[in-house]
Amino acid sequence: MLYVGLDVHQKRSSICILNQDGKTVKQELVNGRWPQVIDRLRRIDQPFGICYEASCGYGYLYDQICALPMASGVSVAHPGQLRLIFKSKKKHDRVDAQKIAKLLYLGEVPAVHVPGVDVRSWRKLIEFRQKLLAKRTAAKNQIRAILRGNALTAPRGLCTKKSLATLATLELPAGEKLAMEMALEEIAELTARIKRVEKELKKIADSHPGVTLLRTIPGIGIRTAEAFCAYVDDIKRFSRSRQVGAYFGLIPCLDSSAGKDRFGHITKDGPSTVRKLLCEASWVAVNQDPAIKERFDRIVNGDKDRRKIAIVAIAHHLCRVMAAMLRSGEVWRGHADKQEH
């Protein structure tokens, strides 16, 4: 059994091979893209385990390596945790490959979950929609800046047909008039692209039973439900529901020493898109469900400065509830149902 550490890049990758005693038997540089790396690994004539850092395209590489006849195990390491383990001033591809191989040999790889190709594609589509929304927001802010600079008030609904028509007829200086027209064109184009992406996302969501189940929760819409399901993927990989909250970075940092626990800000680990959507959905849930509103008010405890803390706590609560629902298959039990029981 061999242990292979791979420091992979787009055009050049470093490979380190350890034997069953943990001794380095081969270390080489592969000049070329990923097909050349796969060809080199295919020439290994003994069963081997391999580990590399998660980066752009790690899923594609995972599928290709798993298909190799001698690959007995493929581990993808969390890059952030690897930096904590090997915090060093000496950064070199050859050294990194050797360190990764040693971690694999010792069984100490901080591994990440690698979803299937369909789920990876689903996640990318969700993230692409978020990027389009960010661009549209930037265009809206540009319009607001132009209006503010000319002592004009922005309409309440900036993207409605009526507002867009009004903005197009405003009398502005030549340069700002052109900027306004281009911003309006950009908003129209981005809105059309967002609708196209959402149409494709809806097809996926409609065929996913988990999305339908989670949408029974007050405040949880299709966008939040689909993002949660896409990133959780297989709920069975979490032994407890509270681990899902940690996965999405909704738990506070903890500094425990001498019997004293000091809690700080949330960790913000994991996908920020899901965390953002959960917080947005929490505001809606607070307004729609009496039980959630009661929990929110209890955390706020009359202090308005604690509203943001409370909404993050609600997001964490909903996250754990969603995980439990996916595991059990039960629909949301509202305030009335709980009173009956």
Image: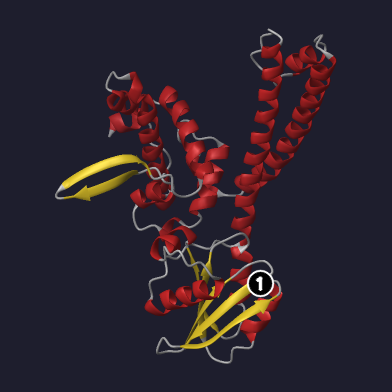
Name the quarter where the C terminus is drawn: top left
Seen in the image, is 305 located left or right of residue 16?
left
Q: Is residue 18 visible?
A: yes
Mark 1 residue type: Arg
Q: How many marks?
A: 1
Near mark 1 (Cα within 10 A), the count class, few <14, some 14-19 or many ≥20, is: some
Q: Looking at the image, is 121 positioned above or below residue 151?
A: below
How is the rendered protein coloured? secondary structure
Q: In the orientation shown, which residue stands out farthest toward the front? A: 89
Seen in the image, is 131 located left or right of residue 107?
right
Q: Which residue shows up at 62% across the image and 78% down it?
A: 67
Q: Looking at the image, is 153 positioned above or below residue 286?
A: above
Badge 1 element: strand
Q: Residue 236 in the image: x percent, y percent?
A: 42, 59
Q: Looking at the image, is 4 positioned above or below residue 171?
A: below
Q: Residue 145 in the image: x percent, y percent?
A: 67, 19
Which residue is nearer to you in this view: 334 or 42?
42
Q: Which residue shows up at 62% across the image and 40% down it?
A: 130
Q: Is residue 74 visible?
A: no
Q: In the orientation shown, which residue stands out farthest toward the bottom? A: 45
Task: Classify residue 154 by image quadrant.
Answer: top right
Q: Looking at the image, is 251 positioned above or below residue 311?
A: below
Q: Which residue shows up at 41% across the image and 52% down it?
A: 327
Q: In the orientation shown, which residue stands out farthest toward the left? A: 259
Seen in the image, is 328 located left or right of residue 4?
left
For mark 1, what is the residue?
Answer: 12
